[in-house]
């Protein structure tokens, strides 16, 4: 076994690193990127470049997520990177994205890992994100989630009840909950809370509204509950986000 490992190490030592990175260009529908300790892009595969709308890696080398992602999303990516730099892992997190002004839903599974030097020090991060529409979203269960997800995203600021969401989706409450648990591993109520929190983070960054005004505008009636949920979901307080972007 040790001899086999030595042969493997010797083989990969003889392969130029750029060739290993080039292999990632042939992964279908998979975004791959590498960042240094400052969160700056040092590599992205062809799928990643196409996703952010650039034709050449040189156009984004040394840039952070703020250069090509909306501020509220870039902020979350940077928070994730800080956690990974501290040794934490992000493993197959299912994310639902819906571009503003679009009726199309995009489903991604994202994983991130720390990048170690030969001395064992964390010197950066790398990650992969795969769009699921090519396979999973064509399945009946995922297609059935499209209606309730769209309804929640369109009406999250209202005092929604599960019965209302189920009725709009032509499902029973129990069927609605089963499908969310099966395909998103969360309940409809948890998804609603996440949508509200994501919108709140966006408003914290892009507007000068007070925290209480923002909490109310996205559907929270209790300021303290909003702050606790925000802390649980984003690992920081709303006031910290506001202070960072408005100082």
Image (spheres, rainbow, N blue to C red):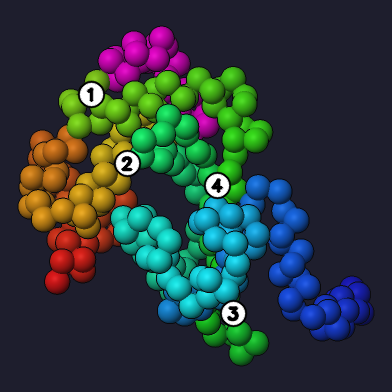
Q: Mark 1 points at which residue?
A: 160
Q: Which residue is drawn at 26% across and 51% down?
A: 202
Which residue is situated farthest in the bottom direction here? 119
- Label 3 Cα neighbours within 10 Å, binned few <14 / some 14-19 / many ≥20: few
Answer with mark 2 or mark 1, whichever residue precedes in sequence. Answer: 1
Mark 1 to mark 3: distance in Å?
A: 46 Å
The reply, left or right, for residue 4 in relation to residue 193 is: right
From the top left corner, tell me how far across and down residue 6 is, in percent. Answer: 87, 81
Mark 4 to mark 2: distance in Å?
A: 16 Å
Answer with mark 4 or mark 3, whichever residue precedes in sequence. Answer: 4
Location of residue 25 (image quadrant):
bottom right
Q: Which residue is drawn at 22% across and 57% down?
A: 205
Residues tagged 3 and 2 counted as in contact (Cβ below 8 A): no
Location of residue 48 (image quadrant):
bottom right
From the top left corner, tell me how far across and down residue 212 is, in percent. Answer: 8, 47
Q: Can residue 106 be found in the magenta stretch? A: no
Q: Can residue 180 be found in the magenta stretch? A: yes
- Label 2 Cα neighbours within 10 Å, binned few <14 / some 14-19 / many ≥20: some
Q: Is residue 86 visible?
A: yes
Q: Name the residue under label 3.
A: 116
Q: Which residue is drawn at 47% across and 32% down?
A: 104
Q: Which residue is drawn at 26% across and 44% down?
A: 199
Is label 1 in a helix, a strand or a loop? loop
Q: Could you tell me which quadrant the N terminus lies in? A: bottom right
Q: Name the residue under label 2.
A: 194
Q: Which of 27 and 195 is in front in this view?
A: 27
Magenta span covers which residues? 162-184
Q: Can residue 237 be seen in this view?
A: no
Q: Residue 109 carries which label?
A: 4
């Amino acid at each position: 076994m040790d001899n086999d490992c030595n042969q493997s190490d010797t083989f990969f030592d003889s392969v130029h690193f750029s060739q290993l990175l080039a292999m990632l260009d042939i992964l279908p529908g998979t975004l791959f990127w590498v960042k240094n300790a400052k969160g700056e892009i040092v590599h992205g595969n062809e799928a990643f470049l196409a996703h952010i709308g650039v034709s050449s890696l040189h156009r984004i080398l040394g840039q952070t997520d703020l250069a090509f992602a909306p501020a509220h999303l870039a902020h979350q990516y940077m928070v994730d990177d800080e956690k990974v730099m501290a040794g934490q892992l992000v493993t197959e997190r299912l994310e639902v994205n819906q571009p503003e002004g679009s009726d199309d839903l995009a489903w991604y599974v994202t994983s991130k890992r720390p990048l170690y030097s030969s001395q064992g020090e964390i010197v950066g991060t790398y990650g992969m994100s795969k769009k699921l529409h090519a396979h999973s979203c064509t399945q009946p269960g995922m297609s059935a989630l499209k209606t309730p997800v769209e309804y929640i995203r369109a009406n999250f600021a209202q005092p929604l009840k599960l019965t209302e969401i189920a009725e709009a989706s032509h499902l029973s409450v129990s069927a609605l909950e089963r499908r969310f648990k099966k395909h998103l591993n969360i309940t409809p109520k948890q998804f609603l809370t996440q949508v509200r929190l994501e919108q709140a983070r966006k408003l914290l960054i892009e507007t000068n509204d007070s925290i209480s005004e923002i909490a109310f505008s996205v559907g929270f009636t209790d300021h303290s509950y909003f702050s606790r949920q925000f802390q649980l979901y984003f690992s920081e307080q709303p006031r910290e986000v506001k202070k960072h972007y408005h100082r």
